[in-house]
Image (tube, helix red, strand yellow):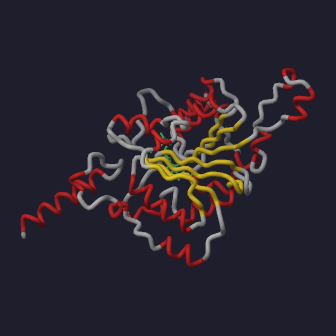
Amino acid sequence: MGITHIRTPKNFVLEERLERYADGFETHPKTFAGAWAEACYPLPCDAINASARQHRNRFDRVELDLGCGKGSFIIQMAQKHPGTLFLGMDSEPLCIAYAAQYILESGLRNVLVIPRGADALPEVFAPGELDAITLNFSTPYPRAHDARRRLTTIDRLLVYRKVLAPSGTLMLRTDSQPLRDWTLTQLEATGFRTLWVSDDARADHPEFPASEYETRLVERGARIWGVCATPDREPSPEQLALGRKANPSLMSYLPDDLESLDYVPLGMEDAVKNAINRRRRAARRQ
Ligand SMILES: C[S@@+](CC[C@H](N)C(=O)[O-])C[C@H]1O[C@@H](n2cnc3c(N)ncnc32)[C@H](O)[C@@H]1O
């Protein structure tokens, strides 16, 4: 079983887990659209005096980790930034069960997970509600055929533009230079302005804690590629059309000399091996 699969431990009953850790996730997220910062604010009324309550009855910021996995990134962020509400979304119930467990065990009151996939974004958040969206090690779907499933397609980026505040940020961190570089074409097409682009985001942006995947992939020799961008001018139809023409196969963003790669991004191992073998066979035929 590869690193992309989540192992289910023996005697693990998902429904039981979800029931036990139900306070760590929100099953009716649409109800909170437009009101996350207030609705989730932990107001221990007897502990907060009236004047403090007047001045402070909402979180300062709301940040989303889309594809949050088991939630380690948002839990660490919530520890560091108590005035911010951190929400995690993931389409995989097993991840939600783990994330909810770890959230409850942390005792933190500014972090919560939502058992929904990216398609639900426009129903779960009001326009301009999010201060940041983070995509940590998003599933890369390297084949052209699957490109529409990536979390940084033009269509997804147009949705992020809507739910992000005007000065909000979208950050991608990944072990895949091809995914980062393809994402740059999609960001440009959708009128995002890049705030930073990094070929070593761990060194350049140590303020962001490591997610589960980051820890595992760095152990295997990965470097972290990143980009952070903010919505800028509305994209023109020509700009969008140009972005839709970007080569969707992530193979085309790898260097020509595949044999020189000291690390192959997650999900591209077989494709790289096959391409190397094809080239060797072709060279032998010449
Ligand atoms: C490679 S894992 C990364 C998990 C975590 N962000 C990390 O860095 O450790 C990708 C995660 O994205 C989730 N995912 C994939 N497609 C999604 C979608 N359309 N909406 C929400 N989550 C998605 C998967 O269930 C998985 O948990």
Counting the numbered discs, the total is 0
Q: Nearer the viewer, residue 134 or 228?
A: 228
For image coordinates 36% across by 47% down, the residue present is 266
Residue found at the far bottom of this picture = 238
**Left or right: residue 129 compared with residue 87:** right
Q: Which of 126 and 92 is in front in this view?
A: 126
Residue found at the far top of this picture = 47
For image coordinates 66% across by 67% down, the residue present is 233
For image coordinates 59% across by 52% down, the residue present is 170
Q: Where residue 205 sits in the image (x, y, percent)? A: 51, 41
Q: Where residue 3 sits in the image (x, y, percent)? A: 36, 40
Q: Where residue 119 sits in the image (x, y, percent)? A: 59, 57
Assign the N terminus to one quadrant of the image. Answer: top left
Q: In this view, does 93 lie above or below 9?
A: below
**Left or right: residue 166 compared with residue 254:** right
Q: Where, by quadrant of the figure, is residue 61 drawn?
A: top right
Q: Is residue 250 above or below residue 174?
A: below
Q: Where residue 218 sits in the image (x, y, percent)? A: 38, 37
Assign the C terminus to one quadrant of the image. Answer: bottom left
Residue found at the far left of this picture = 285
Q: In this view, does 70 lie above or below 189?
A: above
